[in-house]
Image (cartoon, rainbow, N blue to C red):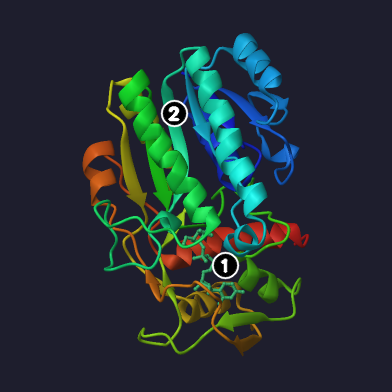
Amino acid sequence: MRVLVVGGAGYIGSHMVKMLLANDHQVITLDNLSSGHRDAVLGGTFVEGDLADVAFLNKVFTEHQPEAVMHFASFIQVGESVRKPDIYYRNNVTNTLNLLDTMLKFEVRKFIFSSTAAVFGEPDYVPIDEAHPNRPLNPYGRSKWMIEQVLADYDKAFGFKSVCLRYFNAAGADPEGQLGERHDPETHLIPLILQAASGRREHIQVFGRDYDTPDGTCIRDYIHIVDLCAAHLAALTYLKNGGDSDRFNLGNGAGFSVQAVIDAVQQISGKHVQVIDGPRREGDPARLVADATRARHILGWAPVFTDLETIVAHAWQWEQKQVGH
Ligand code: UFG
């Protein structure tokens, strides 16, 4: 298919572009390079521009005639979204509406949306399935939940078919070492610990050791970026085959504590990581683990890189490349 990948120069988008190309799809990457990297787009067509620019979007759809769209371009920092809700709603909601309305205009009705575990808020139970209530706790989570609801309405009114994929903790890197995580500033746990291991950072701070978990640190469901992208590929096939709009939680179903991740990094890298114990970070639930049974059944998806060591090893390979080893 001809697939427009919005945000294809970012961490997840760039791995997706690589996978789509490897599976013989035609790829058009659209990115404003506000946080993405041009050199992370390994092939296909690249167009630089912004979703705020509707005339530009019209031009892209006229020239490239995509058959399906994957949308990875959004702001992703929970804390920042609390301080600057205006830019989160403008980018994650208004700009996404521009994209959706351009798709309608050009009669492109297959959409894969990067959603998040943050649409659930503090969980009532884990693992979290799709039936869990949605009570997002911050503007970031709310912006994603708003779009999920818009998509349900667009389906009813316009027959617009979408798959919302709620990512838990995207992690790891391209096993071939070509791509990885390059956020600035970096806020995610695994790259931060790896930077502490490689010497790019002095230490890692653990945000709270007094949670109700076996070692007192928070538990998250780290899902390998390649498995995450494989779910998008399966969703694309699903929509192509006439699948109905749906939402899926994506994770391994296994949770790892912050301390377990630190231990894994030390073991894989052979480096000592200096750890400082800090206070809890506001809004962090003790445990976030996905129940991805639905994605397995309906999309026929199964994660491959489920052990923490492999996830960390691939990310460590990338980190070493960043420091020039
Ligand atoms: N953590 C630390 N120290 C750090 C950074 C993180 O102890 O320096 C801890 C956090 O408290 C958390 C865990 O490591 O327990 C993972 O934190 P991340 O920031 O890497 O990821 P989050 O689970 O907070 O966030 C992820 C996505 C968000 C999404 C959220 C859904 O990155 O985009 O899940 O709840 F919103």
**Foreground pick, 296 / 150:** 150
Q: Position of residue 179 (x, y in %)?
A: 63, 47
Q: Secondary structure at mark 2?
A: strand
Q: Using the rendered view, name the quadrant where residue 52 is placed.
A: top right
| Mark 1 CB lies closer than 8 A to ligand 1 | yes
Left or right, 7 with respect to 223, comes to: right
Residue 50's place in the image compared with 36, above or below, is above
Q: Nearer the viewer, mark 2 or mark 1?
A: 2
Give the crowd class for mark 2: few <14, some 14-19, many >=20 residues within 10 Å: many
Residue extending furthest toward the left: 297
Check disc 2 and report the residue beneath it: 111
Label at residue 67: none
- The residue shown at (56%, 45%) is 12
Residue 61's place in the image compared with 142, above or below, is above
Q: Position of residue 40 (x, y in %)?
A: 68, 40
**Foreground pick, 13 / 161:** 161
Q: Using the rendered view, name the quadrant where residue 14 is placed.
A: top right
Check disc 1 and report the residue beneath it: 190
Q: Is residue 320 visible?
A: yes
Quarter of the image that includes the C terminus: bottom right
Q: Amino acid at mark 2?
A: Phe
Q: Position of residue 156 (x, y in %)?
A: 31, 25
Give the crowd class for mark 1: few <14, some 14-19, many >=20 residues within 10 Å: many
